[in-house]
Image (cartoon, rainbow, N blue to C red):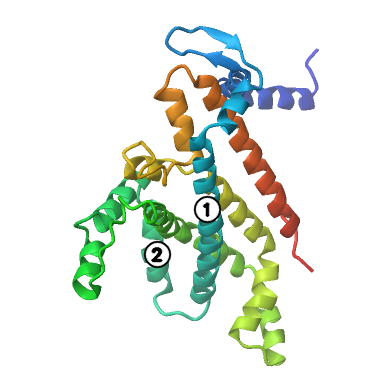
C-alpha cells in the first residue's frame, strides 16, 4: 500500500533538505559546540593535550590588558560607526527617493564601494592615509598640518571607522530606499497639507514607517562592527598596533588561537564573551525598535 501523498511530499522535502542540514551541522553547529567545550579547557593545539580549566580562562581574560584594550576599541568603534552609517544611509536614501535627475546613475555610483573587496578597500585607504599618502600630503601642503594617521594611536582607529562607513553606507542606503518606495504617497501629501517641510515630513512619516528596516540596519551594523577583523588586521599588519589602538575582539581571538597555540581555550572563551555581548546589544536594540511593525 502506497503512503499518503502528504507523507510522500514530506519525505521528498526532507530528502532535499538533508544535504543542506548535514553541511550546516558539520560546518556550523558542530564547530560551535566544539568551541563551547574548548572554552573551558586549557588546550595546546600542537601537542593536542587538554586539561579542564573551567572559568579560569575567563579570569585570565579579565586580567589581560589586551582584553580591555580590545573591548574599549570595539565599543568605541560600534558607538561611532553604527549611528553614522545609519544616519548617512537614511539621509542619502531620502534624497534619492525624491525627484532627482539621473537617479539610477547616482545609485550605481554610490553602490560601487560595496562591490569592492574589503582587502582592496583597506589597501586604498592605507595608500591615502600613509605618511606619503594623498590626504597626508594635502594637509601638509595646504594647511601645514602633519598627521601620521596610521602610526598615531589617536588616528589609526578613526581611519578604519571612516573606511567602514564609506563601504557600508551604500548597502544600507539601498535597503532604506527600497523601504521608502513602499510608503504610500498619500501620507506625505496629507502632512504637506498641514504645512510640513521636508525635514518634518521625513521625521514624522519616513522614520516611523521604516522602523522594521531601521531595526535590521542597526542590528546588522552592530553585528558587523563587533566582528570587524580584516581592516584592522591589514592596516596594523596583524598586531593591532600602534599601541593596541586597532586591536579588536576578533583580532585578539586570532592572536590567541593562531599565534600562541596553547591558548585556544582563551580564544574560544573570548568568542563566547563576544557572542554574549552581541546578543545583549541586539536585545537592547529590539527594545527601541519594533522589528515587526511601525512605531505608533
Quadrant containing the C terminus in the rendered view: bottom right
Query: Label for residue 33?
Result: none
Tell me how far mark 1 sits from mark 2, CA to CA.
26 Å
Question: In the image, 56: left or right of 258?
Answer: right
What is the number of the mark on residue 76?
Answer: 1
Say the numbered circle drawn on residue 110.
Answer: 2
Residue placed at 59% from the left, 23% from the top?
57
Q: Residue 136, percent across and down?
A: 24, 62
Which tag, 1 or 2, sits closer to the chain's start? 1
Quadrant of the image for the N terminus?
Answer: top right
Q: Residue, x 50% and y 67% (percent of image)?
A: 88
Q: Nearer the viewer, residue 292 or 76?
A: 76
The quarter of the displayed image where residue 193 is located: bottom right
Report whether residue 20 is seen. Answer: no
Number of marks: 2
Mark 1, other Cα within 10 Å: few <14 / some 14–19 / many ≥20: some
| In the depicted structure, whether residue 134 falls above or below residue 62 | below
124 or 209, which is in the foreground? 124
Front tag of 1 and 2: 1
Where is residue 231 shown, x and y percent of the image?
Answer: 38, 45
Amino acid at each position: 500500500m502506497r503512503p499518503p501523498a502528504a507523507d510522500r511530499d514530506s519525505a521528498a522535502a526532507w530528502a532535499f533538505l538533508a544535504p543542506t542540514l548535514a553541511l550546516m551541522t558539520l560546518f556550523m553547529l558542530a564547530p560551535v559546540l566544539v568551541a563551547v567545550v574548548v572554552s573551558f579547557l586549557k588546550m595546546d593545539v600542537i601537542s593536542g593535550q587538554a586539561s579542564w580549566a573551567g572559568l579560569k580562562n575567563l579570569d585570565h581574560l579579565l586580567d589581560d590588558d589586551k582584553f580591555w584594550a580590545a573591548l574599549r576599541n570595539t565599543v568605541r568603534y560600534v558607538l561611532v560607526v553604527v549611528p553614522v552609517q545609519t544616519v548617512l544611509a537614511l539621509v542619502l536614501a531620502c534624497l534619492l527617493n525624491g525627484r532627482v535627475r539621473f537617479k539610477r546613475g547616482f545609485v550605481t555610483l554610490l553602490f560601487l564601494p560595496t562591490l569592492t573587496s574589503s582587502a582592496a578597500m583597506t589597501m586604498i585607504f592605507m595608500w591615502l592615509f600613509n605618511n606619503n599618502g594623498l590626504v597626508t600630503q594635502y594637509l601638509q601642503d595646504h594647511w601645514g598640518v602633519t598627521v601620521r594617521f596610521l602610526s598615531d594611536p589617536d588616528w589609526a582607529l578613526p581611519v578604519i571607522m571612516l573606511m567602514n562607513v564609506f563601504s557600508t553606507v551604500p548597502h544600507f542606503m539601498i535597503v532604506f530606499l527600497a523601504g521608502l518606495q513602499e510608503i504610500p504617497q498619500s501620507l506625505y501629501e496629507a502632512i504637506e497639507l498641514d504645512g510640513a517641510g521636508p525635514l518634518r515630513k521625513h521625521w514624522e512619516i519616513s522614520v516611523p514607517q521604516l522602523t522594521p528596516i531601521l531595526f535590521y540596519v542597526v542590528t546588522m551594523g552592530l553585528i558587523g562592527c563587533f566582528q570587524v577583523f580584516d581592516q584592522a588586521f591589514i592596516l596594523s599588519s596583524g598586531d593591532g598596533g600602534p599601541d593596541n589602538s586597532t586591536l579588536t575582539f576578533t583580532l585578539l581571538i586570532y592572536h590567541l588561537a593562531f599565534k600562541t597555540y596553547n591558548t585556544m581555550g582563551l580564544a574560544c572563551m573570548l568568542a563566547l564573551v563576544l557572542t554574549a555581548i552581541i546578543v545583549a546589544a541586539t536585545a537592547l536594540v529590539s527594545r527601541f525598535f519594533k522589528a515587526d511593525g511601525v512605531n505608533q
